[in-house]
Amino acid sequence: MDNTSFGVFLFTGPKGRLLFKAQQARINSLAKSTRSNLETHLRAFLYFCMYLAITPFPVDSSTLTMYIQYLGDNMRAPGTIKNYVFGLQTLSQLKQWSFPVLTNSMFRMQFKGIARSLAHTPKRATPMCPPTLLYLSQFFDFSSSYESSMWAVMVVGFFMFSRISNLLPPKKGRFDRTKQLLKSDVKVSADSVIVLVKWSKVIQLSERLVTLPLKAIPGSPICPKTSLLNATRLAKSKDSDHLFSYRKKQSISTIIQSEFISFLRKKLKSAGLDPKLYSGHSLRRGGASWAFHSGVPSELIKHHGDWSSDSYLVYLEFSVGDKLKTTQFMSSVQ
């Protein structure tokens, strides 16, 4: 999304140039993914206004009430409906246009009523775990540069509790060396590999670096050190190449997010597992859940996964044994 997507016009004179740059700075405050989402939200709202012959901006209470109901009639997830409305609010703020107050009881009741009628339970990706990874390793060809790099994505992603966006670029040609992991971002020691993360969902402005040491597991297929060394050796990659590059004939290629998800699901299917249950988020959920199950303190889980709040708690998958501990502890106090 460029500045013209928001209807930015060139200003003249010194004051005009400053106003233009101020508006440009507000737009640049948004991540590329956020801008892309706002484009989607804007198109949906404009189509709605064209259909009803309504003037789109500035948005008034009557228009917003109808739009929320329109979204409720055409979408299944209450959270998605709110995202589209919040996107519209952000667009209005960027243009300094008035926008209805969403905390108004009228809107809160409408959101709640739509959520009640939809009765939507969000689908959560099945968490990956070491037994599943070990089982899947039987279906990989570790002499293949491509499959070895895919395996390294899985193992490293699991042990780092990584978002898929931290591991792989979103599309071909979108490999950004200032954001994505490079081979040079990994330091190898005798008993571990240390990964330097310079960008993530919560590190947008290079304000800090996150250093994550991953313990080696000698002799195991899920050893992060062995997996990375094998992948980079077969790829014959340079320090400036993407960490999860692979050798394709005489050139180097980079795995992208959709490619990895498609590959993962094919492997799951060939292993007799249901591919629909898993996604790229299975690595992040699985790593955090396994750490909790293994007794890792919550503070370390939060830091290791680079969560900026206690939202990491919703990622954890509690086993029956974990849940049973609640009443076990309670019953032990007499």
Image (spheres, rainbow, N blue to C red):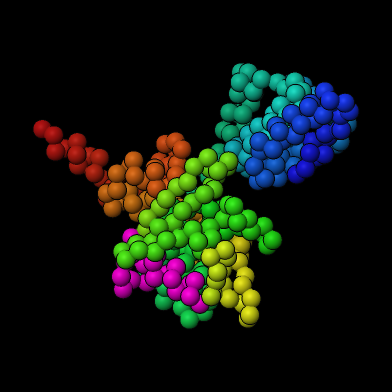
| Residues in magenta, as a range | 215-234
Residue at image point 64% right, 58% down: 175
Tell me the quarter of the picture where residue 246 sits: bottom right
| Image quadrant occupied by the C terminus | top left
| Image quadrant occupied by the N terminus | top right
Image coordinates of residue 133 in percent, x first then y, are 40, 66
On screen, residue 68 above or below 264? above
Image coordinates of residue 181 in percent, x first then y, are 53, 57
Left or right of residue 75: residue 234? left
Residue at image point 42% right, 73% down: 137
Q: As rendered, which of 47 and 281 lies closer to the eye?
A: 281
Tell me the quarter of the picture where residue 127 sits: bottom left
Left or right of residue 32: residue 306? left
Image coordinates of residue 198 in percent, x first then y, are 52, 49
Q: As rendered, which of 83 and 212 lies closer to the eye?
A: 212
| Residue 225 lies in the magenta stretch | yes
On screen, residue 112 above or below 1? above
Q: As rendered, which of 7 and 107 lies closer to the eye?
A: 7
Name the residue furthest left: 334
Left or right of residue 119: residue 161? left
Q: Examine the rendering and report whether any part of residue 260 can be seen.
A: no
On screen, residue 25 above or below 97? below
Tell me the quarter of the picture where residue 96 sits: top right
Residue at image point 66% right, 32% down: 86
Image coordinates of residue 330 in percent, x first then y, are 19, 36
